[in-house]
Image: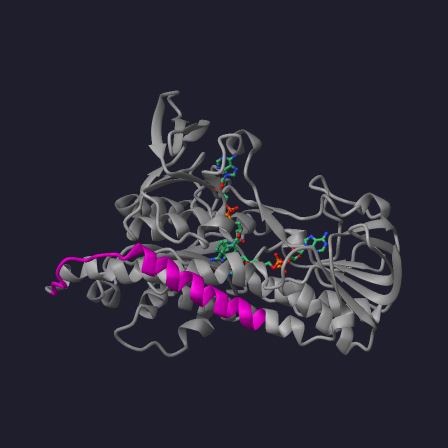
Amino acid sequence: MKTIRTEVAVIGAGTSGMTGYRAAKAGGKQTLMIEANVYGTTCARVGCMPSKLLISAADAAHAMLAAPAFGVHPGDVRVDSKAVMARVRSERDRFVGFVVAGVEASPAEDRILGHARFVGPNQLQIDEHTLIEAERFVIATGSSPIVPDEWQQAGPRVISSDHVFDWEDLPESVAVAGTGVIGLELGQALHRLGVRVTVFGRGGSVAQLSDPDVLDVARSVMLEELDVRFKTRLVKVEAHGDGLAVTSEDTNGDQQVEHFSYLLSAIGRRPNVHKLGLEHTGLARDHHGIPLYDKQTMQCGTSAIFIAGDANDERPLLPEAADQGRIAGDNAARWPEVRPGLRRTPLTIAFTEPQIATAGASYAELCITHAGRFAVGKVSFENQGRSRVMLQNRGALRVYAEFRSGRFLGAEMVGPRAEHIGHLLAWAVQARLTVEAMLDMPFYHPVVEEGVRTALRDLAHHLANEPAHDHPCVDCTPAP
Ligand SMILES: Cc1cc2nc3c(=O)[nH]c(=O)nc-3n(C[C@H](O)[C@H](O)[C@H](O)COP(=O)(O)OP(=O)(O)OC[C@H]3O[C@@H](n4cnc5c(N)ncnc54)[C@H](O)[C@@H]3O)c2cc1C
Ligand SMILES: NC(=O)c1ccc[n+]([C@@H]2O[C@H](COP(=O)([O-])OP(=O)(O)OC[C@H]3O[C@@H](n4cnc5c(N)ncnc54)[C@H](O)[C@@H]3O)[C@@H](O)[C@H]2O)c1
């Protein structure tokens, strides 16, 4: 076995690993990046980009179907599913190509292929071929989709999002397990492209929402279009002919057996920390096996090990992976003199239609940090002018601010243009604006943002009039 010595070893060449590698190099350290699989990142290969390509095709089909409501009749809509998947794959490959080119632009001697695991606090073994002795480490190993063993036993028709974007054609039907972001984004897109889709949610959750009022609206909006079975769990999945027999059970204990071409498991992703030999590092870990770390510096305890991106499961999103990787790599280079990096205001967007966004503190978080100390304003998009004009008048926005200071704290929304409104509101949180200052900002006409103004005016009214303990937060823990 070959032994290599380096100053910094970065485990994983995904988004967080690449930014970590670059930051450590920029800090003047000799740095190695180790990748177990292929270059190209989860985001470009099987995540953000191909999912949005599929969603864009679905939106095009949906726009045709929605056109007659405006008096526009496009004629028969035909989805050429092979052409849809060919575009998804070719554009995906183009994005992956750029990423791979970026990795390969780094010196070849800085890159090692193979699975890394700690065999000592300062030592990694790569497969069976190399030992790396390093002073500092960045764990940037990402996450993997969860597919329960009992489902997997039904064979290859049980899949995760990793498989969808390699399809050459669309299947007849798909059962989706999970009403999280992946389940709803992919479930809705496949449905709009003509696939028979049923989404099973064991509870009542919808994507990343925690506000009970917004959740209620989101559930009804999703149910208008999609076959979503909330509070229905899968009790049996068996191979059946070319597809699967899926048995589900609702809260009354009523069972139903249905047949689908595939079952897409979208019940969450697990950080890749289990085959890393972390027991040899001496790091304290939580009950999921993730090392305890500082959210400002990414440092694990006082060690020279840093953890970034999906691997720490804090905010498993692309912009976070990039930020955290940069902070981790920068501090690995500085160690032992680490310093806090830029952590931005939380922002999440689900690319469903209507879109779903959260900005700043979530309702559930405020129920803990600000119980009885925050006011809520709201707007429904049902009668919002521009939304009605576009026939996108579905959804609701709830906005939160602190009593006394009037500081804007966060928002949750399902509705039109949520990807843009989410940014606007996250920027307001990060700029520490008060609701009053936000209402002093320009609002054009007719725009969806006028709905935001309505919600902010409602919030200002509550801030001025609502007694401080009037918001009991009785329903802060929506069903999973
Ligand atoms: C379907 C889907 C859609 C998504 N859509 C969005 C979106 O629209 N917007 C958004 O912000 N986020 C989205 N995400 C999330 C986003 O893709 C991830 O948060 C992000 O890619 C995580 O980057 P990372 O660097 O932490 O992990 P990765 O990019 O997964 O990189 C980790 C790397 O580490 C390697 N590795 C693992 N273990 C080892 C080891 N022991 N040794 C060596 N190498 C190892 C892996 O092979 C991998 O290459 C989506 C995810 C999915 C699955
Ligand atoms: N637009 C985006 O930003 C985007 C898109 C896709 C994925 N992502 C990222 O990927 C992560 C993973 O997405 P996801 O949708 O897989 O996870 P998720 O955590 O968003 O949702 C998982 C869903 O599965 C349910 N669930 C959990 N265990 C279950 C079980 N045993 N049986 C049935 N249901 C179960 C949960 O209640 C939840 O509804 C997200 O948290 C997000 O960070 C982001």
Q: Main secondary structure of the magenta part?
A: helix
In the rendered image, the vertical position of residue 114 relative to residue 171, given as above or below:
below
x%, y% of residue 120?
A: 88, 50
Answer yes or no: is residue 403 visible.
no
Looking at the image, the residue that sits furthest to the top is: 253
Q: How many marks?
A: 0
Q: Residue 186: horizontal and vertical position, in percent?
A: 40, 51
- Side of 395 relative to 139 (left or right): left
Residue 208 location in percent, x, y? 48, 50
| In the depicted structure, whether residue 247 falls above or below residue 49 | above
Q: Which residue is painted at 26% across and 45% down in the image?
A: 224
Q: Nearer the viewer, residue 208 or 5?
A: 5
Residue closer to the observer: 133 or 309: 133
**Can residue 84 be spotted in the picture?**
yes
Residue 183 or 394: which is nearer the viewer?
A: 183
The residue under the point 25% across, 74% down is 446
Q: Quadrant of residue 71?
A: bottom left
Which residue is drawn at the image coordinates 60% and 67% (left, top)?
344
Question: Where on the picture, by quarter, is residue 63?
Answer: bottom left
- State whether residue 259 is above or below residue 160: above
Direction from residue 332 to residue 213 in the image, left or right: left
Q: Is residue 209 toward the left or the right of residue 173 in the image? A: right
- Above or below for 263 versus 119: above
In the image, the segment drawn in magenta is 72-99
Q: In front here: 367 or 141?
A: 141
- Split into 4 quadrants, where in the image is the N terminus? bottom right
Q: Is residue 86 magenta?
A: yes
Q: Quadrant of ligand 1?
A: bottom right
Where does the image place residue 357, in percent across and percent down from the top left?
44, 58
Q: Is residue 437 magenta?
A: no
Display colour scheme:
one colour
